Image (cartoon, rainbow, N blue to C red):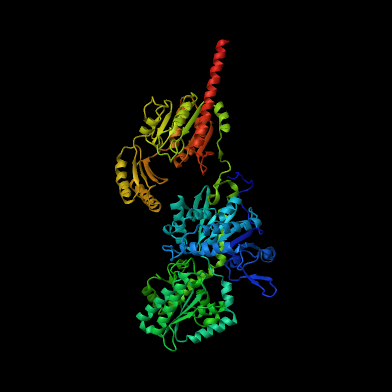
Amino acid sequence: MTVPGIISGSSEVTSSPRERKIIVANTLPLQSKRDSETGKWSFSWDEDSLQLQLKDGFPPDTEFLYVGSLNAHVEPNEQEAVSQTLLTSFNSVATFLPKDLQEMYYRGFCKHQLWPLFHYMLPMFPDHGDRFDRKLWQAYVSANKIFSDRVMEVINPEDDYVWIQDYHLMVLPTFLRKRFNRIKLGFFLHSPFPSSEIYRTLPVRDEILRGLLNCDLIGFHTFDYARHFLSCCSRMLGLDYQSKRGHIGLDYFGRTVFIKILPVGVHMGRLESVLNLPSAAAKIKEIQEEFKGKKLVLGIDDMDIFKGISLKLLAMESLFETYWHLRGKVVLVQIVNPARTSGKDVEEAKRETYVTAKRINERYGSLDYKPIVLIDRLVPRYEKSAYYAAADCCLVNAVRDGMNLVPYKYIVCRQGGSLVNDSSPRTSTLVVSEFIGCSPSLSGAIRVNPWDVDDVAQAVNSALKMSEAEKQLRHEKHYHYISTHDVGYWAKSFMQDLERACKDHYSKRCWGIGFGLGFRVLSLSPSFRKLSVEHIVPVYRKAQRRAIFLDYDGTLVPESSITQDPSAEVLSVLKALCEDAKNTVFIVSGRGPESLSEWLSPCENLGIAAEHGYFIRWNSKKEWETCYASTGTEWKAMVEPVMRSYMEATDGSSIEFKESALVWHHQDADPDFGSCQAKELLDHLESVLANEPVVVKKGQHIVEVKPQGVSKGLAAEKVIREMVERGEPPEMVICIGDDRSDEDMFEGMLSTVTNPELLIQPEVFACTVGRKPSKAKYFLDDVADVLKLLKGLGDSSSSLKTTSHTEVAFESII
């Protein structure tokens, strides 16, 4: 555990022009080239790199620092010189991973394990994807550690913002947060995030989730990806999320981890500049001449199993089969980008693509007409832009893709300026898979299920026969969105949210807890501190009247304990406290009066407030009393059938019957379904009980209905008021509890003792069990800590009693 600390000063983090943005990605936004004759390295900016393009969202004087690997191997004896060149000339820091580590980290874990899994591909058989390999995972962690070391060498943690890109570096946040508890850290995932049913198969699922949760802001392209991530956090880590003023936030050990949902955009200037090249203009004319009199459908995809190229070809085959009048009039130009991965799957996809294309061309083609044109080579950017500008329809048929900017690029190039046809209005038609990240933002596109080849064929036919007016309207709608949500807008919006997420960093105390990849930071109020025996005993000794309120489950008895009755140690501690005549000790619990009175019977002077204070007994010789007017049982007859119907509909849920309340539990139900049903039940009961004297409350895995005014806080207030009325106002009040209901007790206690009507000003020690956000001022780590503190107070009472008896005996002798 690291030492807690707080930096003094304003909680406002003011911006300054010298604040740096540190962009960390797998590769640097640089192109590397080594002269074969001299052996010297030369470097240049990669204008197509996202890391470089995102600068457009910031003022020109914003300083950027890039951390990542080069796209070439640099020998160890050259690394120092290259590092100096990169830092001084390009503000870049290279990571220089060893060759074997680079291979295992990138080719092994990233591309053969994470990437397929995030695209919903499970290694069901040894020849169908790679099974999890612990050595590759260790290489992934080692590579992330090297990245963190390089970031630590250059970061100014109080001022710099760190923005990590993509799935290659998902445990990097843990290393950085461990070194700098208050680091300002963002992460954006550029791939899909799979559903919990897929993600939970990953043996290191918790380590990766905790790594991401060590960020302040996590970005996703779509709500679906964010929803899957939140579901995984709920199901695997038990974390709940809520929307705070329009921003989704996860409470993680006192820190709020915010979720950002915004698809990345394209660089408008880069696309337009390429389109304005003379070579692009010449290529557009060449394409228009080549396919004159024909409708041009364009596809541009990487050669991999998720881009759906073979399904696209089958859809075109269905198009020619079903809509025979389009034969000879429609051409699909499919540009195949080089594969980013290798393996049997890629080779098989490539083979199927060529076989299918050959079959279609032989069946529906002729000497002067090829319905399918495959371009399988490295195509220059100007040539791609020309095809975009000339195409009548763009078909993106991926079965799973994180974002896919092909539709965006197509729309921008179709806008095209004077190169397409200056006198005609701009038009475009899009047919896109519903499984790609850009699909939700393209509301004018025809969305298709790529697996349904007949549906795709019908969509292409609809796009080709669409009226010019409709094509123009759809194009204008898309172009307006894409031009206003470009890469600069995306970067600026993300960084604004990151600044907002980090603004409270210096107003809280931080503790680092956990080991290895389980490390996380506990962030709490500066005034929140551990309650020690040494701190409380002097006040305890001085006080002539004391009120002590103790929760039961999770405070005196561990929640995980199989038997819930108190141990001999608990009974001994309680008896010692109760035997001191200056003490009024109460157990305040949600449990029923029967079990509490049975378990605590050895402590005759112990007060009990059962069912959250609905029943109160001052000691074992007194009768149980209720401090609330009877509300009758009519409401129970209304509540029970409603709860029972939800219990029957929700597997794993149950109903707890109390004399004062009815409680629906769903902790053993499916987390998502149970939470959804709890919200529905809450709304249902509130409408049914609108005119009844009861309240409906949603707690941790429960929905509870109880009479109005029943809470631990009001029970504690009643005890203190009665002590004041007896002429025994407490000079010291101690409250200890661990759960949400105890927060009511802490809050009620603080409002009671500050009530001017009572004319008391006792010293208050409100203490929660466990280091977590609380209304209490103090904390104790666990049940053992609670018992240690109470034993210290009991021993203090015994020593005071002994001292008092000695003084009395001495006076009698005199």
- For the point 61% across and 44% down, which residue is it? 5
Q: In which quarter of the image is the C terminus?
A: top right
* Furthest-top residue in this view: 814
| Vertical order, 420 against 110 (above or below) | below
Q: How many marks?
A: 0
Q: Position of residue 546 (x, y in %)?
A: 50, 28
| Vertical order, 486 against 649 (above or below) | below
Q: From where the camera sits, is residue 154 visible?
A: yes
Q: Position of residue 268 (x, y in %)?
A: 56, 72
Q: From where the camera sits, is residue 467 visible?
A: no
Q: Is residue 480 left or right of residue 53?
A: left
Q: In this view, does 157 lie to the left or right of 690?
A: right
* Furthest-bottom residue in this view: 367
- Residue 102 falls in image quadrant: bottom right
Q: Position of residue 288 (x, y in %)?
A: 50, 85
Q: Is residue 551 left or right of residue 146?
A: left
Q: Quadrant of the N terminus?
A: top right
| Vertical order, 501 against 122 (above or below) | above
Q: Where is residue 93 in the image (x, y as percent from the top left)?
A: 64, 62
Q: Nearer the viewer, residue 232 or 550?
A: 232
